[in-house]
Structure formats: C-alpha cells, structure tokens
Image: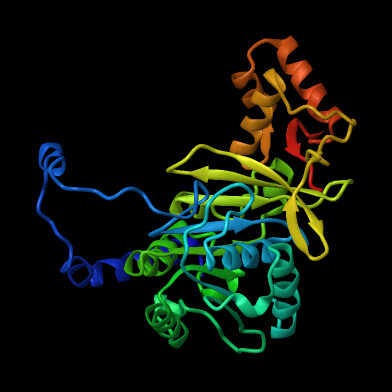
Amino acid sequence: MNDYVSFAEYESLEFSSFEQTTSHADTTLKSAAELSTIEVPERQWAWQDWLPLGTASLLGGPPGAGKSLLAQTICMAASKGLVLYGADTRLMSTLYLTCEDDEGELIRRGQAIAAGFGSTLSTFHDCYLQSLVGLEDPAICGAGFRKTQSYKTLDEWMTECKLQLVFLDVIPDFWHGNEIIRQEVNRFVKGFLGSLAVKHNACIIGLHHPSVQGQTSGKGTSGSTAWEGSVRSRLYLKGADENGVRQLSLKKSNYSAPTGIDLKWDQGALRLSEQRYIDPLLKDGGRQPLKGVAKRLHEAICDRDGEMTHAEVKAVLPRSDQRRDAIKALKKRGLVSESDGMLMLTEL
C-alpha cells in the first residue's frame, strides 16, 4: 500500500466521521473583545516550564541515555510535589507505564530514585509504576484508529486515581499507525494522547528514540516531523559524554523559553551535574558551539533532511569564501561528508 492510498483511506475515514466528530464542538464565533470577558486561569504545569498540563508532550533520547530513569524520576517527584532540578513540580497522582522494563526493574530503579530524594520507595503512595512487559498488544490506538481495551483501561485508571502525569514508554508500543504519514501521527497525538490530556487536565508524555539523522543533527527528532508539530513540549536527553554528563534540553515549548540542564548518573539516580556537557559531535576537540556561517549551513542541511546540493548551499551562502569556511568547519568536526556533489550529515 502506497502513501497515496493510505492518505485516501484516511481522508475517507475523516469525512465519514465528520458529522460525529464535530457535533459536540462549539461552533459559535467569538470576537477578541468577547473572548476578553472570559476569565482564564493561569497556565498549569506538571513540571514548571518543562511539561504543561492539558497537553501531549514528548521525551526523546538515544538508547541508554536514561529516558526511562528520567521519566520515572519526574513521576516520583511530582507525586510528592518536590522541586526537581531547580524547577517546581505540581503535587498530583502520576503514572509511569512501560513496555520496556519488568516490575523488578521498576522497583530497583524506584529505590535508587527515592534514596536520591532522601526517602524510601514505600512513601510514594501517589506514584503508580506499571509494567506491560509480556502483554501481547498494549496499544491504546488500534488499527483504523480504534480505541482499544488498553485505551479504556488507561482512561479508567486516570479517572479513578486522578492521574495528571502519565509517561508512555516507548510510544511505538502504544499505537498501530505509520509515523511516516503525517496525518496519522497528528491524529494519534491529538485524538488519543491529547484527548486524554484535556479530559483529565493531565500531561501525557510519550518516550521515543530519535532517528540517526535526529541524533546527528542534535535536534533529537524522529521519523515524521509531525511528532514535533503535534505536541506542545518536547524534551531531549542526550547520551552521556566522556565524563558521564548527560544534557537534558527543552527542544520545543509553546509556552516557555528553551532551556537545558546537565545531569549525571549517581548511584542509580540522575542528579544535577557541576560539569558541563561536552558534545561528542565536536570531534576536533572543540568545546564551543557552532557559530556564524558554519551554524547557518548546518541548520540549513538539517532542515533539508540531512542533504544539500552545492547549488542549495550557494543559495544559503552566496559568498564563495563563506561556503568554503563553513564546509571546512563542518567537515573538521565530522558533522558532514561530501559525495557526488552533495553535502550529507554524517551518521554516527
């Protein structure tokens, strides 16, 4: 089945259910003046400036970076309303739902995290840790965008336990769509994750692995760019550098400024690090971020899915000396290779 047929089927499904999906919407137009009379509460955060309530978010990172450890740490901190890495968490019931680790690992990890907070795992009554390892199909979104029994169960859990922070580890285990088709990604994020987030005033975070190009570019993106466009917040945890430091960055936030912190693994927990993260992409030993024309060219290549012709490079950098210097800088750092008249991001 090609993408055209897939899109046609999707479009047909959308129009067939148009009346049903729009019947509950308020279609009354309101002017800006009318909206100004509505009292709007302050924005609420599960984790201040990092994870907003009422929305879907993403947490990405390469295998072994510590995404699962970080997700469970955030869940445990928020269940007690603790300050985490200098930012407040909102006191709430939380759930870490994983298809990656069994119950024994959740307990071992939880004990180390609790010790890092100066406590014991037995005191975290409002943090729920659930392993789905061994379950044949944990997807909440089935074929044809059908809400599965797993979706209904999650919805019931969120209602009964008043869950407002839910991590799904990892996101491909929770749906049957095709991430290359942007419409499918958008529908899953907004129609499944987003609908649960709005219904329960919660933050639903899907964990994911970046593509090779996403790792190489440092942006941490994965597959379709629709993932980036559909969520309100996207966090990215880089793997440990030569000193064991990991960088957590807020790559996208519609409601706060981009930020980043450096973390280090210590006795099974992630703690703030006094050492700065050293990007392993800087293979020439440099420790400063890309600047000037090199940065412009690198961003342009990333925006073009990792490849550029020399004609495209010339359009970005008209001056020959700038092109020469930019390409030389990127090659020196091992960020690009050149072949058959093309510049390509280097795969790690």
State left or right for residue 301 relative to residue 182: right
What residue is at 39 percent from the left and 53 percent from the top? 44
- 331 over 267 or under it: above or below: above
- 335 over 321 or under it: above or below: below
> Can residue 98 be seen here?
no
Residue 3: x, y in percent?
A: 48, 62
Nearest the eye: 133 or 213: 133
> Which of the 4 image quarters holds residue 155?
bottom left
> Which of the 4 image quarters holds residue 187?
bottom left
> Which of the 4 image quarters holds residue 188?
bottom left
State left or right for residue 265 relative to residue 237: right
Residue 125: x, y in percent?
A: 55, 78
What residue is at 60 percent from the left and 21 percent from the top? 316
Nearest the eye: 31 or 3: 31
What residue is at 41 percent from the left and 63 percent from the top? 7
Residue 305: x, y in percent?
A: 62, 42
Residue 117: x, y in percent?
A: 68, 63
State left or right for residue 150 relative to residue 322: left
Nearest the eye: 301 or 195: 195
- 267 over 301 or under it: above or below: below
> Can residue 59 be seen here?
yes
Nearest the eye: 150 or 268: 268
